[in-house]
Amino acid sequence: MSVPKILCVGALTMDTIYRLDKLPDGPGKFIPLDAVEVAEGMAAAQAASIVRLGGASVFWANRGDDATGQRLVDQIAAEGVDCSHVRLRKECQSAISTIFMDRAGERTIVPYYDPRLMAAPESLPDLDFAELGAVMVDVRWPEAAELALKEAQRVGIPGILDADVAQIDVLERLMPLASHVVASEPAARQFTDADTTVDAVMALADWHAGFVAVTSGEDGCRWFNRKTNSLRHTHAVKVDAVDTLAAGDVFHAGFAAALVEGQSEEAAIRFASAAAALKCSRFGGRLGCPTRAELVEQGFPPAPAN
């Protein structure tokens, strides 16, 4: 049985990542230990990672009418992602970002987004949403995210929100439309004004009637179990981290892929946590995402046969 596709909606950015011995503390010339150019952005990294993790994905995003835009689409499509719904925006520059990272994974990010690139869409992409396994959106293209989440609600499939740091009104607008909210710790604490991650999860669970979780890097993931009406904590898998860039995106990808396969929310979080941890042990942003075969070696079940 084939795995239904997950529609990923949001950011598409060309990242140039330099790994240095230490971050610059002033002007000068600095020779990197490693360097890579990779198509990323939250939704793009999620779409590509879903495929590596044994799922299937279709991508709805924006690219400029420049050479960078074509390279972006080519890279994500090469991962096996359906990119036929990536919009070509005339007279717009594709999103780019330069990232400096030290040996411990600490980083400085310099992004540039053409404000015309993320114009509100006139309509949904030409897809049969009832045939999708889920919709997953980030906060970088809120008008499109809203349309996609509403359609997911209408046809009765999971709508997963990657609730990263954003304007409060964007989160207030998108959260009620999602069946599953997986937030970063900074975003959850900003949104709830909570002093601790535990307080943030409990506040989100009071505010949102669906599934809520908050990721905290090496401290793992805390989530609210509606069946037992209790707070749960899934510990992170311990690794020697060298690059945490895109770890959250790989986590979201693993969670969505496992959920669509029919795994429980708890099993999906364990799967996502393992995928994100292995990614952190490798340099290269989303390129460090493990394959499903590598996770099978860690004791997770194989992907359903196509």
Image (tube, grey):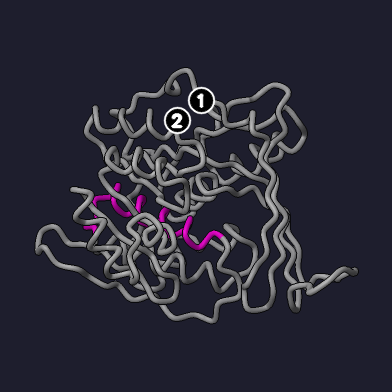
Residue at the disc numbered 1: 120
Can the viewer see residue 296 in this picture? no
The residue lying at 29 percent from left, 37 percent from top is 177
Vertical position of residue 15 compared to residue 236: above or below:
above
Residue 258 among those drawn in magenta: yes
| Segment colored magenta | 246-265
Disc 1 element: loop
User: Residue tagged by mark 2?
Assistant: 143
| Image location (x, y in percent) of residue 117 | 63, 30
Compared to 129, does 286 lie above or below?
below
Q: Are marks 1 and 2 in contact (CB under 8 Å)?
A: yes
Q: Quadrant of the N terminus?
A: top left
Q: Quadrant of the C terminus?
A: top left
Looking at the magenta stretch, what is its main secondary structure?
helix
The amino acid on which the numbered mark 1 sits, given as a three-letter code, is Ala
Answer with the quarter of the image where residue 302 lies: bottom left
Which residue is located at x 11 percent, y 63 percent?
229
Whether residue 166 appears in magenta in the rendering, the answer is no
Which label number is shown at residue 240?
Answer: none
Q: Is residue 65 left or right of residue 209?
A: right
Q: Secondary structure at mark 2?
A: helix
